[in-house]
Amino acid sequence: MKFGVVVFPGSNCDYDTFHALQNVMEQETVFLWHKDSDLQQVDCVVLPGGFSYGDYLRSGAIARFSPIMAEIKKFASAGGLVLGICNGFQILLEAGLLPGAMLTNKNLKFLCQHVYIKIENNKTAFSRAGRKSQVLSIPIAHFDGNYYAPPELLAQLEERKQIVFRYCDGNGRLTEEANVNGSLHHIAGLINEQGNVLGLMPHPERASEKIVGSDDGQVIFQSIIDYWEKKAGGRKKKAGKTVRPVVSPLPPLVGSL
Amino acid sequence: MIDDKTLADHNLTRDEYDFIVKLIGREPNLTELGIFSVMWSEHCGYKSSKVYLKKFPTKGKYLIQGPGENAGVMDIGDGLAVVFKIESHNHPSYLEPYQGAATGVGGILRDIFTMGARPVAVLDSLRFGPLDKPKNRSVAEGVVSGISGYGNAFGVPTVGGEVYFHDCYSQNPLVNVCCVGLAEKDRIFLARAQGVGNAVIYVGAKTGRDGIHGATMASAEFGKETEQKRPNVQVGDPFKEKLLLEACLEVMAKGLVIGIQDMGAAGLTCSTTEMAAKSDTGMEINLDLVPQREEGMNPYEIMLSESQERMLIVTSQDKVKPLQDVFSKWDLEAVVIGKVTEDEQLKAYFHGELVIDIPVKAVVDLCPAYRRPVEAPAFVRRLARFKVPGMPPDLDLNQVFLQLVASPDIADKQWVFRQYDHMVQINTIVLPGADAAVLRLKGTKKGLAMTLDGNSLYAYLNPKRGGEIAVAEACRNLACAGAAPMGVTNCLNFGNPEKPEIMWQFKEAVEGIARACRQFDIPVTGGNVSFYNETEGQAVFPTPVLGIVGLVDDVATIPAAGFRGEREAIILLGENKEELGGSEYLKLVFDQEKGKAPELDFRSEKSVQEVCRQAIKQKLVRTAHDLSEGGLAVALAECSIKSKKGLGFEVKLNDPIRTDALLFGESQSRIILVAKEKNAGKILALARKMKVKAKVIGKTGGKKMVIWHRKKKVVDQPVELVRDAFKNSIPGYFKV
Amino acid sequence: MKVRILVSLKPSVLDPQGQAVKNALHTLGYQTVKDVRQGKVFEIELDNTVRQTVDKLIPEIADKVLANPIIEKFTWEIIEG
């Protein structure tokens, strides 16, 4: 399967997401430059975390006007898989690909820590590799992750099972304390009605290897791969060669753009 | 003729002025005077410190680049090099905590990527006044959000550091930021302006009137009128810096750069003169071409502006266009403002007129060096004579234990660390709060360990010992991760060097650090001196902060910071001595900051560290933690608090010393190792072989923290209670 | 001409920043402060040719870019010209 990781000016989890997909999940992965309009025939677009355009107006507010976003909208409306992580989630909200908005965390501070999230709906393309109510340990790192939607919309999201992940404690309980950023209904991850666009505040790419504390994030990536392989009729495209991990100043990004 | 007031405003003496006249053969104009003033400031010219800094060892087998460049470089194998450096941003952070700290981060990041390295970690050493004062809280809050705001957006993880509180920092907070980067070993870039006729290119943000004379500000004592200097503080733009990073690394990778220098303190002045001076060339620039953010800027302002997120690049004429293309891809400006010349002069034109014409080497290399008078302050001997009072008979050590764990210097700093993105780049395998932070090196089994350390109270009582202990403890922290130290960077924060007592503290501390570095056989690769940390005559404690990096051969062997399993053996390496001078305990119970700083014997220190590393290498160690502030009892408590399973411990001690000194004394050269019972013997044998005192003092497990001394239970507290005291202390100050 | 646009959170949306400022003011003894709402100010300089269409233009850019209509509202005024 082929993933495309979008690079906006200010994206800073682009290499991380690339690393998780290409080197850990062993899937072919390319970078998509924000000024381009070519999605390079990818099967899934990932909007990575970071501070696109410095998040200066509102988180994700300016990135949605990038040329690549117009293509992503078309791609999504044609049923293409789109995953927005953290800032990527914020961009999807601003772009109207997902409903609702983000407010500043309830304690008014940036929060970087491991949190637990619970799979509420494991029937989606992004969660099918997990069990219902399975608790995943995945880190968050954001300032504006306090999900907000008006009451009618929230009711609708609940009814249509669009809330895929919720913040919980280690035992899967929805305690106030576990909802660190103050999100309504503990929303950590949300899917669109059609089921092909997911926004997620926690960072699965930061939890894809045991050595960094958790590999629970693989559940999300594996779900996408499983879904795609099933759809593609068991066709399994093997990954390209593992690129040299990005510790050098010559990242794969330079060559591919 | 320049009058006395102008000279005073520029922090230059009449003698220095006369020397300038002699060097350039005429009276300088105001812009030229400004250039000398910043370049000969303490911050850039090291005029009071130079003679002592020469004592640092600067050679080592892994060394690629020592002091004198933007950062030090060490070879870490696999074709990679680690690039690292520490800088202070103390004065700006007091004036405007958020921007002061943010631009401190921005500046050190540029120091690293200007060398061709991608910044992979930031650590910071912070010193504030006590948190019970609202002003100190607001400074602390501003500084932490500034670091977080800049580092997080830029995308570099802030992986560790230290935070301490003392009243001497109430009006002089210390903000020292250390950045670590990774580069390809054979692709290191230096500040050079080689090749006569080559283009001088200005890249990055536009120049405004920010921070004019920031460098001279950092070289003057604060007075009442400091508030007026506020507009000088620069404003940071991490978004632009992130673009600048990517663009710079891309032009370097494409071979489009001959030399590059960031515009930090003293901006365009420093970059032009240094690049030329180091290459025996000159530079000719046209100030009208410098991208400007404000209208009507004059040459003085353009040359001395400290606007952030700017770099100067020298490259050959045929590479100008491809270089500009890369910058334009990242939406950044790259403007040719001049060329490299042969004559070793900096010449600048403004509106067609030659406004600067000075020899670069005079500016860069001929800053006067002073051997200022030194004199040991009277208090040092007085304080050392202090006799620790006997233990009050009614003192409840079990209660003291709880209070110590909650004292802000020791308590959990999670309130700080969770505001920093410490995981971006997904290399952080030992999170903030442990002895040393460790990054894995993707694609290898190796890890890069790093730590910052400094105990200013020890340095106040005995600056030489304070310097030695800072190095020893930093190395010990690395040892607890299984890493051997490779190289050192340091940030030396002191008061006014024109006072002989301060200069004595500085000299002593430098000698201590130099001696310790020799003992550990590690070179100093660079660093920063910050003088004039005093307000209204009140200096901070001498505060040398050491940043040391080391390598872990196999990250799979790294022990945890907390207990992992029930009934594991707790082993103490090293010796408990009756030392309470300068301890947290003495401060808390007796309200005294006196006595002798702990002894340090390098031979036993090194052996203890070696046993620790060996044991880790042989995969015998489950948990490791070094003993520092708060002593043995606090170290044990920390292992328990950091245990994911909330495991307690029971320890039995029989040392023939005072119970308070045994529990809370801060004797050096001690490490706690925890091992499966069956492996304890192997560790003890290893210790015996290296002549290190070691014994099993107890075991992990249960829900309580229990310590016995000579058959008497002296500490007995539920894990949960101690953990809450540790965790809630600092956040408690910030609840509105 | 110059236009000033004020963007703030809708009354129905909790404003933690405003709350924090209010609490701080109360701690400092300003008990008469009943509520604080925080927002953003944009000052936009416009070409004089838009004079006729400014009533349409400003709401359009405010809605499209400056404010997020799900959580924010805006008001605007001409401050020059």
Image: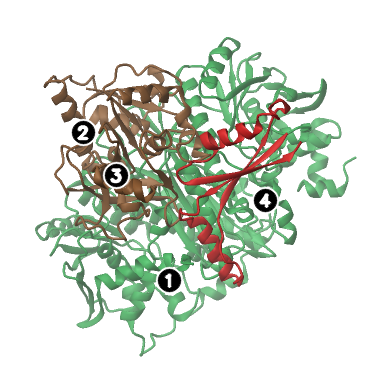
Chain colours: A brown, B green, C red
Q: Is residue B400 visible?
A: yes
- Foreground pick, B518 / B43: B43
| Picture quadrant where residue B237 is located | top right
Residue B417 lies, with reference to residue B387, above or below; the image says above
Label 2 CA crowd tier, 10 Å (few <14, some 14–19, many 20+): many
Chain of the residue on which disc 1 is drawn = B
Q: Mark 2 points at which residue?
A: A125
Task: Name the residue tied to disc 1.
Answer: B583
- Vertical arrangement, residue B283 with respect to residue A201, above or below: above
> Spatial distance from mark 3 to mark 4, Cα to Cα?
73 Å
Q: Image point 29% across, 67% down: which residue?
A: B637
Q: Residue at x 69, y 31 (%)?
A: C46
Residue B616, above or below B249:
below
Q: In which chain is the residue bearing label 2?
A: A
Mark 4 lies on a secondary structure that is: loop
* Spatial CA span between label 4 and label 2: 71 Å
* Amino acid on which the number 4 mark rests in the picture: Arg
Q: What residue type is labelled 1?
A: Ser
Q: In the rendered view, does B275 fall on the left or right side of B391? A: right
Mark 1 → mark 2, Cα distance in angstroms = 58 Å
Give residue A146's position: percent from left, percent from top.
39, 50
- Crowdedness near tag 3: few (<14), some (14–19) or many (≥20) residues, C-alpha within 10 Å: some
- Observer-side mark, 1 or 2, equals 2
Which residue lies at the image location 79% right of the left edge and 48% below the top edge?
Answer: B9
Viewer can see residue B479: no
Specify the label residue B371 is tagged with.
Answer: 4
Q: Distance between the residues labelled 3 and 2?
A: 17 Å
> Is A107 situated left or right of B96 in this image?
left
Q: Mark 3 points at which residue?
A: A157
Image depth: mark 3 or mark 2 in front: 3
Q: Which quadrant, please, contains the N terminus of chain B?
A: top right
Q: Nearer the viewer, residue B151 or B548?
A: B151
